[in-house]
Image (cartoon, grey):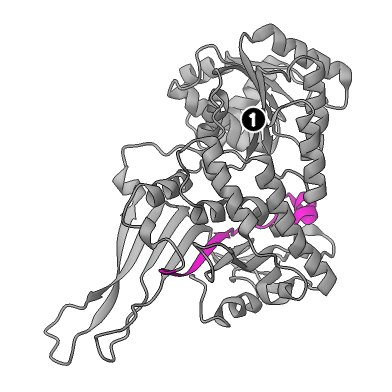
Amino acid sequence: MSRPMASMLVLFGATGDLAQRMLLPALYELQRDRLLPDGLRILASSRSDLDDAGFRALAAGSIERHGHPLDPAVLRALVDRIQYQPADSQDPASMAKLAAAARDRHDGDVVSHLSTAPRLYASICEALGQHGLGGSDSRVLLEKPIGHDLASAIAINDGVARVFDEERVFRVDHYPGKEGVQNLISLRFGNALFEPLWNARHVEQVQITVSETVGVEGRGDYYDHSGAMRDMLQNHLLQLLCLVAMEPPSQLEPSAVRNEKIKVLRSLRAIEGADAASHSVAGQYTAGAIDGRAVPGYREELGRDSRTETFVALRAHIDNWRWSGVPFYLRTGKRLPRRCTEIYLQFRAVPHSIFGGVETQPNALVIRLQPEERISLTLMSKTPGLDRQGLKLSQVSLDLDLHDAFEKVRRRSAYERLYLDALEGNGTLFVRRDETETAWQWVDGILHAWHQQGLAPKPYPAGTWGPSAAVTLTERHGHSWRE
């Protein structure tokens, strides 16, 4: 349901890493293109003891440091919207001052963005409710992860729900806000060419890969508590899986889209007990090399022993009519050879080759989301020549480079789109409570099976594609990872 445009954004954790790298630069770009509502005020808050001028200087430095050339007029227009109010969510007096500052400066809906530790969500929402910022003219953005497991997710969601109705809760997973992910929806449901083939009758396998070359990068304590399964697979990869596998929604609006996504999550076959060894692989990187540069292993970076996984590969199945029998291979990890997010659909081979001994390769569709956005369809084509020794075939690609096709259109960051949608009250790209909890239920089953079966992460050298067991995961079924 659409709501009035918000008149105030309250940003908790405004001096944190996410705000400095992504949130403030996104607001700057929206200001530059005059997309922020004219009357929008921004109330920034954190525990840091700053005044307005100090925070504005910090914001300007962050925007410039993260690759956004400063236009003085645009920066001035943005910082003129900003007031800074220090607050500690565990200190009632400081929260009362923050709420008073918000009430004094807004004349419409208020959006509170909680860019903080998830364990603080319930207490912050409780304070917002106590001070009049949890009513029907308010909504709240929650950053992932929502909890550490199903039980903690339910506890957080219950705490938030005591103040905010579900339709006013916007759970952020920034992947659905990416341009390439948006284009996946357009590709599937805007082209008659693909949708008739998008099912088990024509698709042999699906692979979804989110690979990173970086290590823990100073986030060791957080990462060691979460690991690749909780940090990446439970949210980002499962969101991509839903968008690839869901049925066409009746229309592009929040309830219709999220109803189809939850059906996919509820159709995921459990990976439990003995199945964990044959359907999942956990890994942890050791010392190796990335782009010719020696890098330490995870335990060396962490400074202690650990059984936390930095790599996960799964063979998942969606038990419904559209996808029955099609394996979905999911893979994510740190210190892999290249940074990449892509979706790979391999179609089934032709039922009979008329070309004698000439080998044909199955058609495939590759949807790359980062670092560059590209769609590639591989086909079999005749190799040029007179064919005196028989017809020859070669595999060729039809490529759509979205940067070339739309070179005059600026690429938007995920948070630019997500902020506008949140300010407008459009929840289509945000995650509903039942999605979050159903995803945790599935992931918890795998983690419990690892513990129950005593499955420890297998080592892999940095700069490789994970443990050798990940290769076996696909090859025992006649498939291979796309690398």
Residue at x 82%, y 40% (from the top left corner): 155
Is residue 307 highlighted in magenta? no
Classify 126 as above or below 402. above
* 92 left or right, relative to 268: right
Q: Which residue is mark 1?
A: 167
Instruction: Please state the extent of the stretch shown in magenta in the rendering.
Output: 201-227
Q: Is residue 218 magenta?
A: yes
Q: Amino acid at mark 1?
A: Glu
Residue nearer the viewer, 32 or 12: 12
Give residue 415's position: percent from left, percent from top. 55, 35
Mark 1, other Cα within 10 Å: few <14 / some 14–19 / many ≥20:
some
In-front residue for pair 265/160: 265
8 relative position to 375: left or right = right
Where residue 320 sits: x, y (%)?
A: 56, 62
User: Which residue is rendered at x = 49% and y = 55% of the image?
Assistant: 244
Seen as rendered, the residue at the extreme front is 321
Seen at 61% across and 80% down, the residue is: 472
Vertically, is 114 above or below 465?
above
Tell me residue 237's x, y (percent). 59, 55
Image quadrant of residue 474? bottom right
Give the residue displayed 88% in from the left and 20% down from the top. 92
Left or right: residue 197 versus residue 149 is: left
Q: Is residue 47 visible?
A: no
